[in-house]
Amino acid sequence: MSHRSARFTRMRRTLLFVLAALVAAGFTASTRPRAQAPAPKPSLAERLGHKASDILLIVNADDVGMSHAANVATRHGMEKGLITAGSIMVPCPWFEEIAAYARATPKADFGLHLTHTSEWKVYKWGPVASKHLVPGLVTPQGYLWPDIMGVYKHATPEQALVEARAQIKKAQEAGIDITHLDSHMGALQYDLRFHQVYRQLGKEFDLPIRMGNQDLLAQLGGGHLRGELDTDGTIYPDYLIHDQRKTGEAVDAYWKRIIGELKPGVTELYIHPAVAGEEMQHITNSWQERDTEYHLFTDDASVRALLQQRGVTLIGWRALRDLQRKD
């Protein structure tokens, strides 16, 4: 055999050997068990013991403790109607009345409507913390600012944290079993600096918090915020009904439309129930709407029937808090 023929034969044998090795490797890989894809994360509804397809609804009364009329409406709505939870404004004049009710009614589901503003023209309140500790939160007249822009302009997140902690401590000392946190007028939600205070409070006190829908958060530059809470282990409802009323839409038509559009998962809607009367007429021009919401979610048979027709399950915040602390 010539030298050239011998070299060709060796190359041929090498190629055949490599080919055989590749075939064997491919066979081994094809027969090796594939790694299982991670199981899908259970939905909040499933974690709460329901089916993913269930529609769960928190009907939350905001501004509890702001007035006697709000306290009466909330109590009636919880005892006789569809209100499943309420958010208390600790700095307000009628806090002590609702705190006494909460102590006497431990099953009542109350969180805190953390309050850094005082929006009404002649009906005002100041901070719970000593004013020298939160000077940027206080107007020259000694009240909280009437809008959130005043808070962002004059106060610091550190001062907002001091005031929030003072409100939580006062509620705890009053014997309130706090089930959740949210923010009056969104003062701790519309500025990312202050949202970090909100996040810190949820983690520090191990409480679920109200959060805007993911699409709205993304539009405002906060698309990452829910992920931060997931990292902390802080729970929030899947959806929030916020500012979705159409121009000219009546209050009752609005809420019935919203109920008709509820999605599977956990939704929170918040209302501002208050019994109509001279007290509310001297506080706000929205007194009639507040009275309408009170009756809609307390003694309106058509709203109850619509919820039943949609198969809606009413829940409170306590279920979310207990799940968070269990996890």
Image (spheres, grey):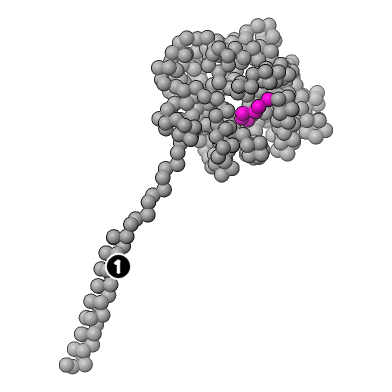
Q: Is residue 234 visible?
A: yes
Give whichever of 51, 128 is nearer the camera: 51
Q: Is residue 120 visible?
A: no
Vertical side of 223 occupied by 90: above or below: above
Q: Which residue is mark 1?
A: 25
Query: Magenta region: which residues?
Result: 176-181
Residue that sits furthest to the top in the current view: 278
Specify whether 40 is left or right of 250.
left
Vertical side of 107 occupied by 136: above or below: below
Specify whether 326 is left or right of 302.
right
Q: Residue at x 47, y 21 (%)?
A: 258
Magenta highlight: main SS: strand
Q: Residue at x 21, y 89 (%)?
A: 6
Q: Which quarter shows the N terminus?
A: bottom left
Q: Which quarter shows the C terminus?
A: top right
* Secondary element type, mark 1: helix
Question: Is 171 covered by the magenta stretch?
Answer: no
Q: Residue at x 74, y 15 (%)?
A: 122
Specify whether 15 is left or right of 46.
left
Residue that sits furthest to the right in the current view: 132
**Where residue 279 sits: x, y (%)?**
69, 9
**Where residue 70 sits: x, y (%)?**
64, 14
Quarter-wise, where is residue 146 in the image?
top right
Give whichever of 167, 241 is nearer the camera: 167
Give whichever of 255, 147 is nearer the camera: 255
Label 1 is placed on what type of residue? Ala
Quarter-wise, where is residue 151 in the image?
top right
**Where residue 31 sits: x, y (%)?**
29, 60
Vertical side of 160 occupied by 99: above or below: above
Give whichever of 124, 306 is nearer the camera: 306
Residue that sits furthest to the bottom in the current view: 2
**Where residue 278 sits: x, y (%)?**
68, 6
